[in-house]
Image (cartoon, helix red, strand yellow):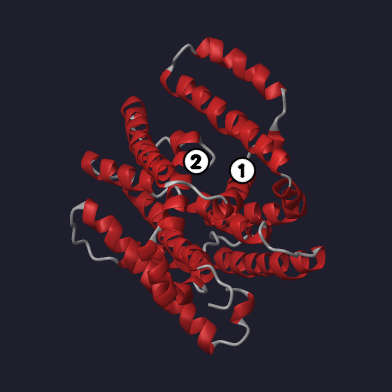
Amino acid sequence: MNGRIPYLDGLRVFAIVAVVAVHVTCFFYTNSGISDWYAACTYGSFVRWCVPVFCMISGALFLTKKELSLQSLYSHYIKRIVIAFLFWSTIYAILYSSHPFSVKEFIGNIAHGHYHMWFLFMICGLYIALPILRLVFANRIVLRYYLLVSFIAAFVIPFFFDLSHSFGIIENFTERLEHGYNRMGLHLFFGFTSYFLCGGVLKTYELSPQRRRVLYATGVFCGFLIVILTSLLHQRHSSGVDEVFYNYTGLLVFALSTSVFIYGRYSRWLEQLSKTVLTKISDLVFGVYLIHIIVLDNMMRIMPDIRLSVWLEIPLITLCVFSISLVVVWLLKKYVPYTNYVL
């Protein structure tokens, strides 16, 4: 396997399928019946683990590397992200440019990137912080302290603020409390760094079967809780979808994401499947992420108006978009020179 870790390859493949599913569900939140909305909400809730798991995969790989020089970090990993971003952001700016054409808007669109390309900014930031995160990871006492404070400050406390604001629970009190809390400026513990560090921890620390079962049950429970809370918000606002509990750095998504990563690590069927099939597909995941929006938008535009149950449509469209994107990336990498630099 050339030093590869099969279950991480498997998780990477399923995570990109989940990313595609997230974007597919967006088409069913508006101009659809109420049953369609609930189907999209259910699927959308249970695939929110996709981006956090990508962060944990990166953390599991980079934090446990024996050596990683700054030169290698910038000349290989960060450079690849920057080149891919500039190339594909230009492609998206051309494809989605408005009429009449504006040079100022065009350049701005390149700098901003298409909506799904925010992930490249985030992962690039994690890579820049990586030398510091490796020092935190190497010191068990500091690591435990960071994860504990991060869990409380970035996940638990904001969750109760979100509940209060969303459902009007003692809102006047929590607004004052939140104002004071924000003054503390605990931004060091916010964002995706917790997922990154958790990836390294969950790769190296063993969990007993009993603890794993508790975490699996917690993850499933939190997935249903995301569905319930988002549905209740929809009943209050009656339009689109309020994504407050979809937040990738929210407490419920954190619980769901860590349970998925742990399941992947200890799953024998995923490891066996990864050794035979998914490792090869894993090499194409970055390219699928970059181009799948083009495939999805065109598919939704030309798709015949044959309505199935949305419970079937969403997974079918997801698999079709993923499969087409996968084939396109494979063909480009195989037959078009220099595409390895941008895919």
Which residue lies under the disc numbered 1?
A: 194
Asked if residue 124 lies left or right of residue 225, the reply is: right
Question: Badge 1: few (under 14), some or many (20 or more) residues near its Cα, within 10 Å?
Answer: many
- In percent of width and height, residue 203 lies at 56, 55
- Quarter of the image with the C terminus is bottom right
Whether 109 is drawn above or below 338: the answer is above
Does the image show residue 47?
A: yes
Alpha carbons under labels 1 and 2: distance apart: 10 Å
- In percent of width and height, residue 80 lies at 68, 69
Sequence order check: which comes first, mark 1 or mark 2? Answer: 1
Asked if residue 61 lies left or right of residue 211, the reply is: right
Does the image show residue 19?
A: no
Residues marked 1 and 2 touching at CB (< 8 Å): yes
- In percent of width and height, residue 180 lies at 67, 17
Q: Amino acid at mark 1?
A: Ser
Question: Badge 2: few (under 14), some or many (20 or more) residues near its Cα, within 10 Å?
Answer: many
Asked if residue 221 lies left or right of residue 19, the reply is: left
* Residue beneath the point at 61% across and 19% down: 178
Which labelled disc corresponds to residue 254?
A: 2
